[in-house]
Image (cartoon, rainbow, N blue to C red):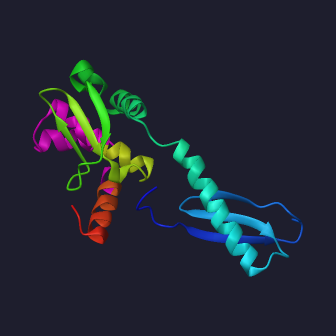
Amino acid sequence: MAGARKPVVEVRRSQRRRRTVSAYRDGERVVVLIPDQFSRAEESEWVDRMLARLAAREGRLTRSDGELLARAGRLIGLYLSEYGDQALPTSVRWVSNQNGRWGSCTPADRSIRLSHRIQDMPDWVIDYVLLHELAHLIVPSHNAEFWALVGRYPKTERARGYLEGVAAVSGTP
């Protein structure tokens, strides 16, 4: 993942482990389990190796445009079901040319585009951005009716705060 920051790694040594090394994600951390007798050099080598394995496995799970469309359908069912076809997009896709926005919507052709910058963000943030764009299919402007639709998502304020924090740190909108 180009541009992805290195995760916080917690190494747990075990006297019971003899040869095996394993790793898993625990929230934002990666936990690497190693034998207690490993040297610091072996520990460093195995941490790098296990981070590479996790990245490769997660790369195979990269979010696709098809997954985005399915996610949009789920969000419509949960928060916009009374709008029926009016809330259905014709396409939802990831794009790499949006560096000033998290997402965009063209109500005229019912297309939604999400910035690749949010692909690795938590699911609840992606859901917020996607629901925001789906709401534009119903209400094109950012008026009170629009924000009432977006506000149906229970993590709206949390997601907005998360995105504001990311923007502040990166210096981009």
Residue 35 horizontal/vertical position (percent): 83, 69
- Asked where in the image residue 158 lies, by quadrant, the reply is bottom left
- Specify the principal SS of the magenta part: helix
Q: Is residue 133 visible?
A: yes
Image side of residue 13 versus residue 114, left or right: right
Image side of residue 31 versus residue 170, left or right: right
Q: Nearer the viewer, residue 43 or 74?
A: 43
For residue 99, above or below residue 94: below
User: How many numbered badges does the structure rendering display?
Assistant: 0
Q: Residue at x 86, y 63 (%)?
A: 19
- Name the quadrant of the C terminus: bottom left
- Asked where in the image residue 146 lies, by quadrant, the reply is top left
For residue 52, above or below residue 126: below
Residue 156 part of the magenta segment? yes
Q: Is residue 154 visible?
A: no
- Asked where in the image residue 140 lies, by quadrant, the reply is top left
For residue 18, above or below residue 128: below
Residue furthest to the top in view is: 85
Q: Which residues are magenta?
A: 130-157
Q: Residue at x 29, y 39 (%)?
A: 131
Residue furthest to the bottom in view is: 40
Residue 67 horizontal/vertical position (percent): 43, 33
Residue 51 horizontal/vertical position (percent): 61, 61
Image side of residue 147 versus residue 81, left or right: left
Q: Residue at x 53, y 62 (%)?
A: 28
Residue 136 horizontal/vertical position (percent): 18, 36
